Amino acid sequence: MRLLVVEDEVVMAESLRDGLENEGFAIDVASDGEEALWYASEADYDAIILDLMLPKLNGFKVCRTLRERDDWTPILMLTAKDGHLDEAEGLDTGADDYLTKPFAFVVLLARVRSLLRRKGTTKPVRLDAGDLVLDPVTHEVRRGDASIDVTPREFAILEYLLTHRGEAVSKQTLLEHVWDFDFDGGPNIVEVYVGSLRKKIDAPFDRSAIVTVRGAGYMLDPSGG
Ligand code: CA
């Protein structure tokens, strides 16, 4: 899957590049609207993440120009919380989805995957460890036949741990993958969420899928605990 990220803020652009490359996407970054149009005419992207406020041509104009060129690459538009342009306007110009800054990376990732799914080009795989199952499509978590209610943040943590099952994952890594770019709290928040996750997926079943690895973080037992 090849994505074009159009973002003029360097730190944000690099965070997106790193995060998405970690998820296995190939990423090109354009830093203004004209460059975005050039990239889009040179390569066939699976989706475009398009910032609204850009030098030269803003995101709406880029979007409209692409559609006028009969380019229907799925577009996720990013905009600021206090933006004076509203969601309806974004969708009117042909964007497929819309995300307000600041956002959690995990939310962006979910939106991107959703866009790619709509195009019918990718199918996220169901993750499992023993009888512990997480379905990224339906957002369900199950232990055997029992359905488990988790919050979006808990879901994201579990998804990350399952993706890396059998490996020690540090609190810092979880922070980077599951929390906002702008989150400035400490890694203790991770302990809180892992604690509540254990109460849902492990304790009621007398299991211990999430293992604490001293000095390293957490590991999801591939057998499901
Ligand atoms: Ca911008």
Image (cartoon, helix red, strand yellow):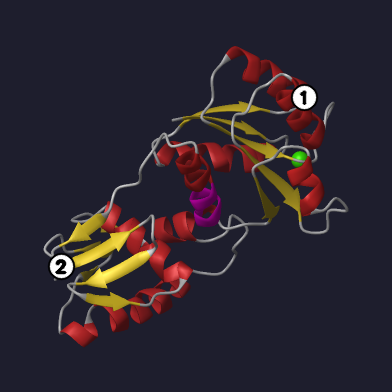
Furthest residue toward right: 84
- Label 1 to label 2, Cα distance in Å? 49 Å
Magenta segment main secondary structure: helix
What residue appears at the point 53 percent right and 43 percent down from the top-left corner? 115
Tell me if 198 is positioned left or right of 47 in this view: left
Secondary structure of residue under mark 2: loop
Can you say whether 65 is above or below 208 in the image? above
* Within-10-Å neighbours for mark 1: few <14, some 14–19, many 20+: some
Q: Which residues are magenta?
A: 106-111
What residue appears at the point 22 percent right and 56 percent down from the top-left corner? 165
Percent coordinates x, y for residue 213 in the rendering: 22, 66
Tell me if 93 is positioned left or right of 38 in this view: right
Let me know if residue 107 is in the magenta part.
yes
> Which residue corresponds to mark 2?
131
What residue appears at the point 56 percent right and 41 percent down from the top-left corner? 16
* Within-10-Å neighbours for mark 2: few <14, some 14–19, many 20+: some
Which tag, 1 or 2, sits closer to the chain's start? 1
Q: Hey, what amino acid is under mark 2? A: Asp
- Image quarter (top left, top right, bottom left or bottom right) of the N terminus: top left
Q: Quadrant of residue 219?
A: bottom left
Question: Would you say the beta carbon of the disc 2 residue lies within 8 angstroms of ligand 1?
Answer: no
Indicate which disc residue 65 carries: 1
Q: Disc 1 or disc 2, which is closer to the eye?
A: 1
